[in-house]
Image: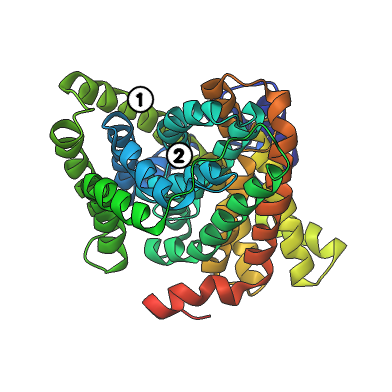
Amino acid sequence: MIYIALLVLIVTLLLGVPVPVSFMASSAWLIFFGGPDGAGYNPSQLLPYGYQQMASVSLLAIALFIIAGGLMERGKIGEKLIDLVDVFCGSIKGGLGVVGTISCAIFGSITGAACATLSCIGSIMFPRFNNAGYPKGHTAALMANASLLGLLIPPNATLIIFAWISGQSVLACFLSTVSAGILVTILISLTNIWLLRDNPEVLVAKKRTSKEKVQLFRERGYLAIPALFLPIIVLGSIYGGIMTPTEAAAIAVLYAIPVGMFVYKGLTFRGLMECLIESGVTTGVIMVMLYSVSMLSRLYILEDLPSKVLTLFYSISENRWVIMGMINVFLVIMGMLMDDISVVTLTTPILMPIITELGFSPIHYAAVIGVNTGLGCITPPAAPVLYLAGRLSNTPINEMMRPCLWFIALCWVPALIFVAYFPKWVLFLPHIVLGTPW
């Protein structure tokens, strides 16, 4: 019956049924027809389990980071960060793309939300790209890829959910993706410059002297100080052990409101209320999804799905590194069908027992999850971030695909190989900061 339940899940997703409803449909099949004797399971045991799983303080961080991202977008905080980065990168060919990439990395490190990063940084950068003669397909693909850096440079909601499900340290999971985030940032910047190297239509800003850079840095740096305090507060407090991610997210919200309202004057009281309402709706959707998938994952465990999957892997190869490759392929396929949070909540209970059975560190696997979920967000047919970039930039998807495939091949695939097959690099920071095994 477990195979029919999986078939129900896949078919409903392919038909465009909302993800939480697809999870519920698969759960319903197992509730009625699952179990060793085909008699099903008692729903009265599953419903309390779902509520028990949701009663976690860690999940509050998701809602708070969503609010913080909305406040930064409306409060013009991202614009000051872009102006500051432009001092150093704006005078080389393709440099404006590097500015957008680094700005996304900084903004994403505060909010951990790809869509909020893309909406904020993209709305500022797309007009600048157009004025500089950048191809629209290239810039849309570039910003779609760069906005996902928030999934690798912590904090981010995906790893909070992974830590919540797997019982791992949130901070250790955060630290595991830092090296991959830095690597992808560098690769996206270099790939952007390489793709534009022979494009005669791309304009290059006037080269600044060192004296001009220092002067401009002083002017823009002064204006950007309130914005730069946000990543210092969030990341410094989390990595320094002063606050939990939930507490740091709450402080980020409280800090972003007065900065957006009274310093940069981009946030109004009406905008604040709209932001809270939108964030509440988004959080509600995520919570419904988490509730539905928590029951489904419980049913998969009762059906002993992890051991069945491991047996399937062993039938192909008993080498754990080959199996790690198969796990990555499986995660990429799942990412093509659903959003990042759904992938994490659905696959973690299934794959975590396999990861530990193979002798891999759960913290190492957190980095694998981080890169795979980022890759899934720009890989059709789902590709929610890629489609959002197309809408924001008014660019047809066919113009975006060729540059996006270059970014996938030259940035995400190397990063995936890096985190999957070089665990020492991934586990280095968690070991140094927290003393975790490596």
Quarter of the image containing the N terminus?
top right
Give the number of the mark in front: 2 or 1: 1
Evaluate whether residue 38 shows in this view. no
Q: Which residue position is annotated with label 2?
A: 290
Image coordinates for residue 289, horizontal then vertical, percent: 47, 34
Q: How many marks?
A: 2
What's the residue type where badge 2 is placed? Answer: Leu
Q: Which residue position is annotated with label 1?
A: 281
- Disc 2 or 1, which lies upstream in sequence? 1
Q: Tell me the residue at 19%/18% (across/down).
A: 270
**Kind of element beneath mark 1:** helix
Whether 169 is drawn above or below 264: the answer is: below
Query: Residue 422, located in which quarter of the rendered image?
Result: bottom right
Q: Tell me the residue at 44%/65% (across/down).
A: 175
Evaluate whether residue 109 shows in this view. yes
Q: Residues within 10 Å of mark 2 (few under 14, many from 20)?
A: many
Q: Is residue 172 left or right of residue 275?
A: right
| Colouring scheme applied when the structure was drawn | rainbow
What's the residue type where badge 1 is placed? Answer: Val
Q: Is residue 253 left or right of residue 46?
A: left
Image coordinates for residue 414, horizontal then vertical, percent: 69, 59
Query: Residue 41, located in which quarter of the rendered image?
Result: top right
- Give the Cα separation between the discs numbered 2 and 1: 14 Å
- Nearest to the observer: residue 277 or residue 147: 147
